Amino acid sequence: MRILVRTIIAVFLGTSQVNCGQPAPVSVQLPQLVQDPSRFKDKLVRIPGFLVIDAQPKHGPLVVLFMSQQGAMDANTKNQLLLIPGRELMRNRDKFDHQNVYVVGICHVVSGANGSVGAVITDIGEIRLADP
């Protein structure tokens, strides 16, 4: 029994040390990230926005973060950010779809046509509803 208790304590302490060593996310607004994605490359970021999940038959879900609800209606490509959803987000999609949220994830820079670059958020570690 003592061995079991010691093992549980050791695992807990080891996990706590790993979690404490993680960097705090960089708070960023969507326009900053869209304008200069290279500045946030491979960083843990925290972004507020209006989340839209669009699922179509025979396709994976398209998850996009907009600056605002109005921005989602305008669908201007400069005011949106693609998210690669994790299991938590897809399990709770009804809770987060068409809501103002905060997303914490890793920013990756992707190359586009004519040398353009954009950002994609992956490894979403936290998503929560924004305060009204």
Image (cartoon, helix red, strand yellow):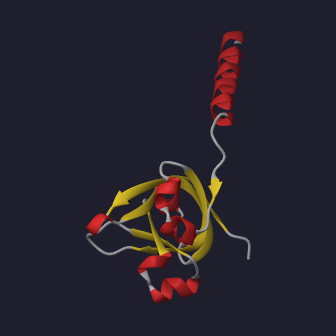
Task: Tell me which corner region of the image, top left, top right, bottom left or bottom right, holds residue 78.
Answer: bottom left
Q: Residue at x 44, y 62 (%)?
A: 119
Query: Is residue 108 shown above or below 57?
Result: above
Instruction: Determine whether 102 is above or below 11 in the image.
Output: below
Q: Is residue 105 visible?
A: yes
Towards the viewer: 42 or 116: 116
Tell me: 16 left or right of 67: right
Identify the residue shown where x is 59% and y is 72%: 49
Looking at the figure, which quarter contains the N terminus? top right
Residue 122 shows in this picture: no
How many numbered tags mark residues here?
0
Residue found 53% across the figure and 71% down from its top: 94
Residue closest to the eye, 76 or 125: 76
Determine which quarter of the picture holds residue 28: bottom right
Identify the image quadrant of residue 48. Answer: bottom right
Residue 46: percent from left, percent from top: 61, 58
Name above or below for residue 65 compared with residue 8: below
* Location of the C terminus (image quadrant): bottom right
Residue at 49 percent of width and 88 percent of height? 73
Q: Position of residue 121 (x, y in %)?
A: 47, 58
Left or right: where 46 falls relative to 123: right
Nearest the camera: 15 or 1?
15
On the image, the x and y values in percent for residue 4 come to: 66, 16
Frontmost residue, 5 versus 96: 96
